[in-house]
Image (cartoon, grey):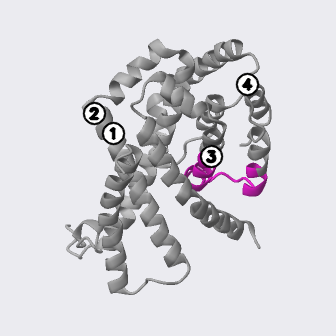
Amino acid sequence: MNLATKKWVFLKLSSIILIPLMIWFIINFISVYNGDYSEVVSFFSNKTNKFIFSIFLILFNEAFLSPAIKHNVKVSSVLKSKLFTIAPTSQFKDDAASKAVLAEEFNKITFKLESKFFKIFSTLFTGSLSSIVIIQLKIVSFFPLKYTHMLKTHRCY
Amino acid sequence: MEDKRPLSPHINIYKWHISSLVSISHRITGIINIIAITLVCVWVSWLVLGEPKYDLINLFLNSFLGKFVAIGLVWSFSFQILSEIRHLIMDSGYGYELKTTRVTGLMVIFGSLILTISFYLIGKNFF
């Protein structure tokens, strides 16, 4: 099986898996989107929700964003590395410290987004957006900092 | 000298068909979903900044515009789900007849509206 066929099969498989995940996401999004702070935090602190949402984000990214940017990467190896990087999710050991560092990381990323605001949206429509920023946002949002650093040192693209 | 030769048919002279409408909508909702997921990530990331800063987003999400965006997102995903199922069926070699493409296209369009209402009601625990 050549690379193009593998990519096609992977896209179709991820589409099949994505259908129930999208239904799960939409129903849960509607149930929490206008809830108060503690409600949203408790939803995303739940290990099951966190895990399902992470898988949803990874597959969504692979199925929708990656074909658009047409990067030349072996899909299976990227998926494996991503799953390896984020699979061992665990709660923050030192919650307060982690939050402070995460907030700092988040500020850095949002600064990048602001400075490249127009570029990001224009490139998104032409299908050449680098997904690094988005992946960083996703990872920073959900996983302990050590995994974020692992991802940064092991750049997928 | 002016060239009087006829131009080749362009996209704007074609009559819209259900299949072309579903196809272009599938692409548009795909782009909307990518942007939406990115914004959802920003929304979740905002949680780490604490409750006072989160209240700003909460204020927006509880406004009319916020609810409109949320319901729009549900429709966009509903459309994508049904259109994806249609694509998967077509990938397996079925549903290429003219009548069938028209019927499945209509099912995607109207089904997405029904799904949107259903997902919203399920999410809000109306059932």
* Residue type beneath disc 2: Leu
Q: Give percent across and percent down for residue B107.
A: 33, 71
Residue B95 placement, left or right of A74: left
Q: Name the residue under label 1.
A: B69
The earlier-in-sequence mark between 4 and 3 is 3
Query: For the magenta stretch, what is the residue range?
Result: A55-79
Q: What element does badge 4 sit on?
A: helix
Cα separation, mark 3 vs mark 1, equals 23 Å
Cα separation, mark 1 vs mark 4, equals 31 Å
Q: Is the magenta stretch mostly helix, strand or loop?
A: helix
In the picture, the quarter occupied by the N terminus of chain B is: bottom left
Q: Which of marks 3 and 1 is in front?
A: 3
Q: Name the residue under label 4.
A: A145
Q: Nearer the viewer, mark 2 or mark 3?
A: 3
Cα separation, mark 2 vs mark 1, equals 6 Å
Q: Which of marks 4 and 3 is in front?
A: 3
C-beta proximity under 8 Å, tags 2 and 1: yes
Cα separation, mark 4 vs mark 2, equals 34 Å
As for residue B61 lying within the magenta part, the answer is no
Asked if A48 appears above or below A63 in the picture, the reply is: above
